[in-house]
Amino acid sequence: MPWLEFVMPSTKQVKHRAYARTGCKPCKTRKVKCDEAKPQCNRCQRSGRNCDGYVDVVTQHRKAESFKFVNYISHGPSFSAALFLHDTRQRQAFEFYQLRSSLELSGPFQEETEVWNRLVLQVAYHETAIRHAVCALGCFHQEYEDETLYASGFLSTGLEQYSYAINALVAAKGSRRCMEVTLIACIMFTFCEHLQGHLGSAKAHVHSGLKLLDTYVTVSREMDRAGPTNSDPYRPYFPLTILILLFRRLDRQLAEFGQQPVRSAHHSLGCQTSYLPDRFQSVAAASGSLEDIVDQLIGVTLEATTRQLVKCSSEMAALRGTWYIRLSQQLDQWKRAFDRLSTLESTRNQDRANHHHHEAVLILRLWYSSCRLFLLLDSPNEVMDYDGGMPMFQSMVDVAQGLLDVQNKCEYESMVPTTQKREKASAPIIEAFMVPKSKYEPCELGCFEDNGFATLRPSYFSRLPMLSKAVFTCTALSPVPPLFIVVTRCREPKLRRQALRILSQLNRRDGFWDSTLAAMCAGTLLYSEELDTADLSDQRGKAQGPMKTGSAKQIIPAGARMLGVRPHFGQGRLLTLEFLKAQQQHEILR
């Protein structure tokens, strides 16, 4: 009988290999090996699948001048940091800040989420004053966004938390830690006032914080030179560079807004020229370098404007010889490094649909053109010299139109209609207009054929009524100032109206800048200039090509041009705008 040979199953267990935890989500779901290419893996691209990205972001060692990128937007926190709060309203406000306000404060520059969504929350866990300040900011943000009649409870809770935060600061003992907590609270209080439309109070917080920051920087550097001691093991909540950066942004916005910056803090914390590489590694690094250039250029412009320097003066020639050449070289080097970054990202991410990334890139391009425009001028006080910058104006309008398209595409996807509307808004109100020739009504704007601007009236405003757009309160580079410059400095009728239309539709509030306020102010200046010019009566509302260089001089003479607008903050949400005429510089015409 032949032997039957049986093959018994092996009892040896096959060793299970753990899959990598850092692969993309589709590959982890399919349980296949992921090559972990960023931002989309090659396996998903070859198979035609949509790579949804990575759950865990590998944090690399970052440079001191840039923030670390943490993708909080796609993936929220695994637990709520408000669990230690017992009051229900306080916990809701804290969670709203954690999930909404911190992302709005970051703006399109997502790398800054590290500050608002991690560092601030860590300080709030340890410090009572910051905890109440975070809750107050969350309440004010809810009150701003919620247009129903039930939003009054958010306002009362926010004011209550605001008061608790101030009392906690008063009760704190004077120390180095107390100074740091007070500085962080000043920043949070500034945004609380922004959301209420109290620009004067926000300015007071910024100026007080800048003066305290000057002392804090001196004390910190002296103690760092002395070395750590066992009796006082001090570890700051915020890196000193981040605190300086945040206050520098607020001070720069006040300077852009026509306010005198804090000179003592400006000199002691003067920005140094950062290292400009051959190619930036990220948009955040490019943004930080461009901010340094912008800060220096604004300082030079303020120097020329304050001293009323004309282009033929020796002082202005000295500024051009020392600062303009240096800043122009830095700007050229920045442009080369940024173009190489954009080229590399376009080859890697041809199908990338990141609205925040595109928005940040366009904002940087807009500011580059604005800086280039001012460096082409012999003096910022010569209003007729702006007519030679028509190509730069056209470039700025084209970039701004692309930014508006990206923003609208993101807006309408998340638009949520509301039922009942409140009769008030939380933005500033125009208290008075001071313009030449009061017989005209510059606020009653006419409606033209191609672009209707009849909606630009001095009334309550914070957002356009047809949108339900979340407020932006970030203090990074805002697209509003460059567009405001186009409307008020470009005298080509069609181009400046196109910029005014874009500005009125941006629907942004970036710190002290409100796009609707800026549009209404710029529109009033535009029509005040053109009311004195009879040659424009036949061109309003007509489609025409771009004006040739020099033709604007024939349309709007120097005597009819405005030098600028000087805002004055009043009590609460009151704001007075004063218009300065070019012939009588720095003289208010009532």
Image: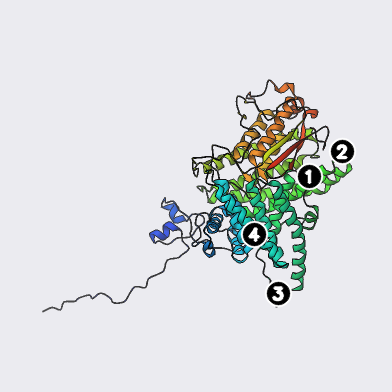
Q: Residue at x 39, y 61 (%)?
A: 31
Q: Where residue 424 sits in the image (x, y, percent)?
A: 59, 40
Q: Which residue is mark 2?
A: 312
The amino acid marked with disc number 3 is Asp
Q: Quadrant of residue 116?
A: bottom right
Between residues 344 and 389, which one lies in front from this camera angle? 389
Give the spatial CA distance, label 1 vs label 3: 44 Å
Secondary structure state at the residue bearing disc 1: helix
Indicate which label's residue lies in the foreground, 4 or 3: 4
Q: Which residue is mark 4?
A: 165
Between label 1 and label 4, give the one nearer the viewer. 4
* Badge 2 vs badge 1, beta-carbon distance below 8 Å: no
| Image location (x, y in percent) of residue 557 | 78, 27
Dot 2 amino acid type: Cys
**Model colouring:** rainbow
The amino acid sitting under disc 4 is Ala
User: Badge 3: how crowded within 10 Å, few (<14), some, or many (20+)?
Assistant: few
